[in-house]
Amino acid sequence: MRARSKLVEGYRSVVDDGRGHSVVTDLPRDKGGMDTAPTALELAVMGLAGCITTIFAMIASGKKLSFEDIEVIVNAEKSDKDLTITSGRIKGIVVSNEPEERVRKIWQDTLKICPVGVLFQRAAVQFEHELEIRRR
């Protein structure tokens, strides 16, 4: 993996992955930015949410678990005195008619192996987890 960032204007940067994909980062106005994009730290939190949905779908596919939808909401806490995220809450919402135990097992397996989640764990950031299963 590789990333490159180029400062464009003010605090706005374009970050690319070397495979033709790019994202923009910026700071909020109260921090001197133009508020045109998420901050790099917000992208990390967004990456965690995206990682969880992807890994859940991959495991569910491999285990032949059918589901209609998954949504992951990550709320991360960072006080003004801290340099980075210190804790947070992850809520998963899965729409499936499969047995609850199967869905919960895949959720737990997802949280164990999600690479971005592992990165946060190794950085000692504690996230509480919650799973809501909805039926159709």
Image (spheres, helix red, strand yellow):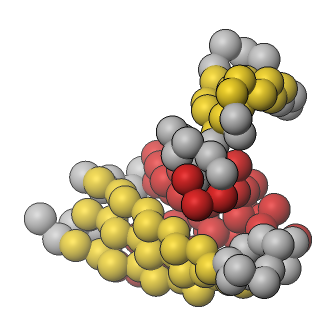
- Up/down of 20 relative to 38, above or below: above
Viewed as shown, does residue 62 lie left or right of 118? left
Name the side, left or right, on which 48 lies relative to 65: right
The vertical placement of 14 against 74, above or below, is above
Which residue is at a point 17% across and 71% down the rendered structure image?
Answer: 135
Write the residue at 87% across / 71% down: 122
The image shows residue 117 at horizontal and vertical percentages of: 71, 64
Side of 68 relative to 47 (left or right):
left
- Quadrant housing the N terminus: top right
Q: Residue furthest left?
A: 136
Residue 72, x across and y down, in percent = 44, 63
- Using the rendered image of the protein, determine whether residue 134 is visible from the camera's viewpoint: yes
Which of the two residues, 20 or 111, is positioned nearer the viewer here? 20
Which of the 4 quarters of the picture holds residue 86?
A: bottom right
Residue nearer the viewer, 74 or 84: 84
Question: What is the tally of numbered marks visible in this picture?
Answer: 0
Q: Residue at x 82, y 72 (%)?
A: 83
> Residue drawn at (52%, 74%), measured in percent from left and top?
75
What x and y, as percent, mark residue 49?
Answer: 54, 58
Residue 62 visible somewhere in the drawing: no
The C terminus: image quadrant: bottom left
Quadrant location of residue 25?
A: top right
